[in-house]
Image: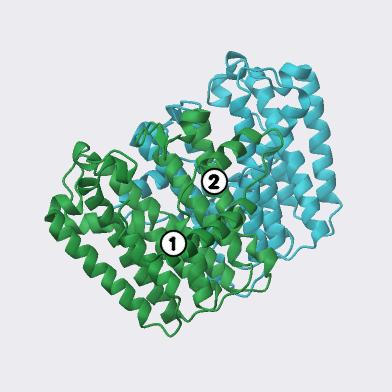
Chain colours: A cyan, B green
Amino acid sequence: MNKDFKEQLSVRTGQVEAVIVKYLPNPEGYQKTVVEAMNYSILAGGKRLRPLLMFETYRMFGGRSKVIEPFMAAMEMVHTYSLVHDDLPAMDNDEYRRGKKTTHAQYGEAMGILAGDGLLNYAFETAAKAFDIEPGNFHIGKALSVLARKSGIHGMLGGQCVDVEMEGKPVAEDMLRFIYQLKTGALLEASMRIGAILAGATQSEQRQVEQAAAELGLAFQIQDDILDVTSTIEELGKPIGSDEKNEKTTWVTLYGIEGARQEVERLSHHSVELMDTLVVKNEFLTNLMLYLINRKK
Amino acid sequence: MNKDFKEQLSVRTGQVEAVIVKYLPNPEGYQKTVVEAMNYSILAGGKRLRPLLMFETYRMFGGRSKVIEPFMAAMEMVHTYSLVHDDLPAMDNDEYRRGKKTTHAQYGEAMGILAGDGLLNYAFETAAKAFDIEPGNFHIGKALSVLARKSGIHGMLGGQCVDVEMEGKPVAEDMLRFIYQLKTGALLEASMRIGAILAGATQSEQRQVEQAAAELGLAFQIQDDILDVTSTIEELGKPIGSDEKNEKTTWVTLYGIEGARQEVERLSHHSVELMDTLVVKNEFLTNLMLYLINRKK
């Protein structure tokens, strides 16, 4: 991870941020409070990883049209809605996220629920704007299907539900893997697959980047488990040891720090291998994936 | 409203019900609780008005394909999610709906939030299945855009947010009209417009049925205000006088029962007039619209 990569990352994240901002709804009319709450949630920060992975995959497969943009914004809206609802009193009951008040803490619980609903709904409203950009592009319908499936009960939301249900109960490896793959992996898979679909990649190429994203997601989440034990509050920017406090089963509680590190190593190696066997290349994307897995916070 | 209409209504509602059931998700896998909660919410009953209006509009314009079916199911999922979230403790805090426990009362608050999210998400996942039925049909993208827009901050959700914000505050006519048009009208507008779009109706025909649906929605909601004052618990099947108890501004509090009746009359007359000026006809649909406006419960 050299200085050059960090610079590129900063520049490209800025470009992604501009796309997200472009597609935010206007806070106007009688309903402007909910729109303000939605924009507050999105603009509270974030690494914009998912739209970045989507865009870089799209470019890798030769995509050059603006048709990707509404999907990039939509993906960040889905991710943000999931955080807003996760933070609600009936869920994790978090008052702060990244040092800022969470949406319901700022706007009240009812508006927190409605802002989350608004973001999920607006994600699809936004993605559907791709039809205005390229009305005859039949890849758009496929991309929309993937976005919906990977966000919902067979994707992120499904993982979230199992996570909520299993709180305080022992979790075996296959269920933990299932939760991680859905809760964390599904949106990464969708991001890279949608990038591939809209760029016109073959079915086999689509499956390959989706698989690479799945292993990236799992490695990313296990790295999260490791950092919760080994990092410091200063480095992580949030309280460490929260998994132990919440009696959560993690990869570390199942296999220890060393076992978790080995699994991260195995998964990231295989994920990058899958990317390397593609005919097309995007060095920045591979570096980004490694950076995410090896991060210290 | 003769016996013949009532019989037809019963038969056609049954057909719509079968379509909805066909598109319900399977409760399986680790995440089956949330799927059960989603299906519980949908199967708790309802008049299935929105998919019925959609289907009859589709048929009126000559539509005969199964491409309408995923949209019918999706519309009922959106409607159901809005009820599930409306009933939450942070919103209306209702324990019962149609004599059955509400979703959060049955499955807990966290699962109530997640089941609502799941339904909204699955609505788009379901609607996107239309692309599998007719991959080359470019009307599907338009229909999806309408579904998303009319459900979200510029539609139902927008009206819901203003309604929540104005609770206990005085509301003037233009804002009340806005709330009714969005909260109640938007999904009726979407239902009839999507039926028209998928059947290949012209832009002008699409606008005309959408306008008829908008006036139907307003009349329907004002009739609701009237029934809350004039009906009996037995007839309505739920407590009357709830608006007064909640200090809600309604059409009746603004203009009295007689003024409200005149507005319902004016709107329903104009709504049916709009339908009558179309080249195509569907007598059952017109009767259904009149039935909804003149209902006693």
User: Where's residue A131, x and y in %?
Assistant: 56, 69
> Residue at horizontal 36%, vertical 52%?
B158
Calculate the distance from the C-alpha at mark 1 to the C-alpha at mark 2. 30 Å
User: Where's residue A196, x and y in %?
Assistant: 72, 59
User: Where's residue A14, x and y in %?
Assistant: 53, 51
The quarter of the picture where the N terminus of chain B appears is: bottom left
> Residue at horizontal 72%, vertical 36%?
B29
Chain where mark 2 sits? B
* Mark toward the start of the polypeptide (1 vs 2): 1
Depth order, front residue of A74/A156: A156
- Mark 1 Cα shell of 10 Å, populated few (<14), some (14-19), many (≥20): some
Q: Amino acid at mark 1?
A: Lys
Tag 1 secondary structure: helix
- Mark 2 Cα shell of 10 Å, populated few (<14), some (14-19), many (≥20): many
Chain where mark 1 sits? B
Q: Which residue is mark 1?
A: B6
Q: Amino acid at mark 2?
A: Leu
Q: Which residue is mark 2?
A: B119
Pair 1/2: label in front? 1
Marks 1 & 2, CB-CB < 8 Å contact: no
